[in-house]
Every structure is written in C-alpha cells, then in structure tokens.
Amino acid sequence: MIRRLARARGAVASLVVLALLALACLVGPAFTGHEPDRFYPDLRQLPAGLTAQPDDAHLKPALDRIAFRMRARVATFARDGDRLHLTLASDQPIDRRSLVYLPRSDLFGPPSVVAEEEGGRRLLLDMPIRHLRFLLGTDVHGRDLLTRSLVAGRVSLAVGLTATLVALLIGVGYGAVAGYAGGAVDAAMMRAVDALYALPFVFFVILLLVFFRASLVLMLLAIAAVEWLDMARIVRAQTLSLRERDFVRAARALGLSAGGIVLRHIVPNTLGPVAVAATLLVPRVILLESFLSFLGLGVQEPQTSWGVLIAEGARAIEAAPHMLAAPAAFLIATLVSLNLLGDGLADALDPRAG
C-alpha cells in the first residue's frame, strides 16, 4: 500500500504540502516578528509586500498621531537612514514622560533628547526607526495578516482533525454494531441515522446557540454530532459484507463473542475505506467551520480561524482585496491537498489495482 501511495506523485506532493502547512501554523508565528493581536494603528490595510514600514507615506501621519497624544505638534522631521531627527513644539512645556508614546507605537525606538529650546516648549529628538515587514499586509486594525493566518490555521486544522476523530469513533462503532447485529436492531439504528439526516445542520447549530454560548467547543460538538452519519453508513455497508466471510464464521464457531468479533475482525477490515473517507471528511469539516465562522456562529474573538479571516476579508474586499486572498489561499491549499491525498489513498487501498 505504501509503495502504491509513493507512486502517486499528486498524493505525495499533497502530503508534503500538508506537512509544511501544519509546521508553518505550529511554529511560524514565532518567526514572523509580530504578535497575532498586536495592533499597528498607523499601518492599517497595508497591501502585501516586502517594503519595510513605516515608509515615507506612513511616517508623517504616524508622527502627527503620536504628537497629538503628547499634546504637541511636529515642527520638523528628517529621516537619515535608520535614524529620525524630530522636532516637537507646543504652547506649553512638553512633559518628557510623554515621550514613552514613541517606542510604544512599535514604529520607533527609545528617543533621546538632543536639545531643549524655549523653556521646554520645543524638543529636538533623535531616535531609531524600526523596520517592520508585513509579507501578506495588515488587516483593518493594523494586525499582521501572515501571523493571523498562521494562528487561524491552528484553529481550523485542530477543528478539522478533532471533529473528524470524534466522527470516526462514533461512526465506526455505530456502523459496525448496526451491520453486525442486522435485523431489527440494524433497521432501528439506521432509521435513527435517517432522522438525524433530515435535521437541517444550520438549524441545529442555531438551536444549540439558543441554549448555549457560542464557543469553539460548541462548534466542535455541533459538527461532530452530524458528521459521523456518513461514516456510520460506510462502515455498516462494509460490515454487512464482512460478517458472512469465512474468517468471521470461523471466529463465531470458536466461541468468540460478538464484541470480540467486531473489535478484532470487523473493524480492522474496514480501516481501508475508513481511512479514505477520513481524508475527505477533514476538508469538509474545515469548510463547515469556515461557513459557520463566516456566519458569525463559529469561532469568536479573540480566537480566529480561516473562516473568520475570510469573512473579514469579504467585508473589505473593495478597499483591501489582500485581506481575502491571504486566508483563502491557505484554505484552498489545505482543501486541495487533502482531497488529492484522499484520492491517492483510495487508489493505493484498491485491491483491484496492480
């Protein structure tokens, strides 16, 4: 099976992409140079690029805003490489304690007073300019979009994997029991599945939100509560064909209990189709999470996910299209890779393949 999977170049490439995405989401935020919740009020909706900030276009507005908070005004300023020569003026003596606003902005380093004129109403300052880079730009609040996308990927991937794992545990057990029991038990269990299929998913989520506060755990429970249904049907169909096989009859003749037969013979022989279905279930769960977050029913601030970022980007698509493109690119790459990996697994586990 591994050799067959290795021959599927698309599946191998997808596996590499998924591993790189997971690694980037896990450790990437520590190397971007920005905290995911750090606001840069003077650098809002910056487009993607390699230009160091603050550039000349954003330098004067940033200085004016900081000077206003210091109850002063910018008289002159001159940029000299990595240094800034700034002159602040005011009708009253400038309180030097207010100079702390300059390094707090994260755009400038600690200033040093070169000279004081007019009884402290005019200060000549010298300070370093920090070089900040936002490879994917910033959002409407001035937060680094690359860092936010990587942190959001942790949530989206965790939701996809956790909900899929819960769906596997419930669906495999439920389907195996129903298929092996057969008869009236099978009929009653599958009618319950049909009843849950008839319940609209969004209505089910809204109903949960009426009684419980929106949270990540609630969303996980809502997704897992419905996504096991397909898995149960797949496992049941496999079990119906397996329970009449010779090795199952032999185990039954040797006195092995029904539970032992299901655990030792039925479930292991359904793992092939289950593995393929799981790789296709993960992207569907991620899409569901993105859909719920887009509607405001999923992940809530201060947490974020790709669905939340896409919703924010959709609202600002005219002014800042990069806000939509960045998280959408991460989501599309993940979904395409998972689907290609599922196709590769299906071919590798096909017993008719050579």
Image (cartoon, grey):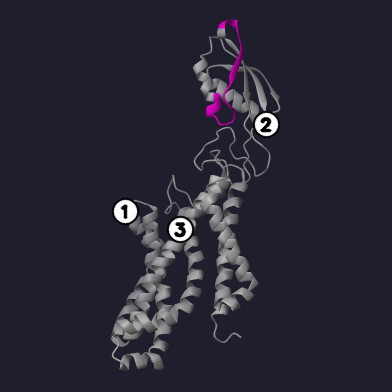
Q: Amino acid at mark 1?
A: Phe
Of residues 299 and 311, the one nearer the viewer is 299
Identify the residue at horizontal 58%, vertical 21% (top origin): 111
The residue tagged 3 is: 158
Residue 200 visible in rendering = no
Helix, strand or loop at label 1? It is: loop
Residue 342 visible in rendering = yes
Of residues 120 and 26, the one nearer the viewer is 26
Q: Nearer the viewer, mark 1 or mark 2?
A: 2
Which image quadrant for residue 135?
A: top right
Calculate the distance from the C-alpha at mark 3 to the C-alpha at mark 1.
21 Å
Tag 1 and tag 2, C-beta contact below 8 Å: no
Helix, strand or loop at label 3? It is: helix
Calculate the distance from the C-alpha at mark 1 to the C-alpha at mark 2.
47 Å
The mark that comes first in sequence, 2 or 3, is 2
Q: Position of residue 271 (x, y in %)?
A: 45, 78
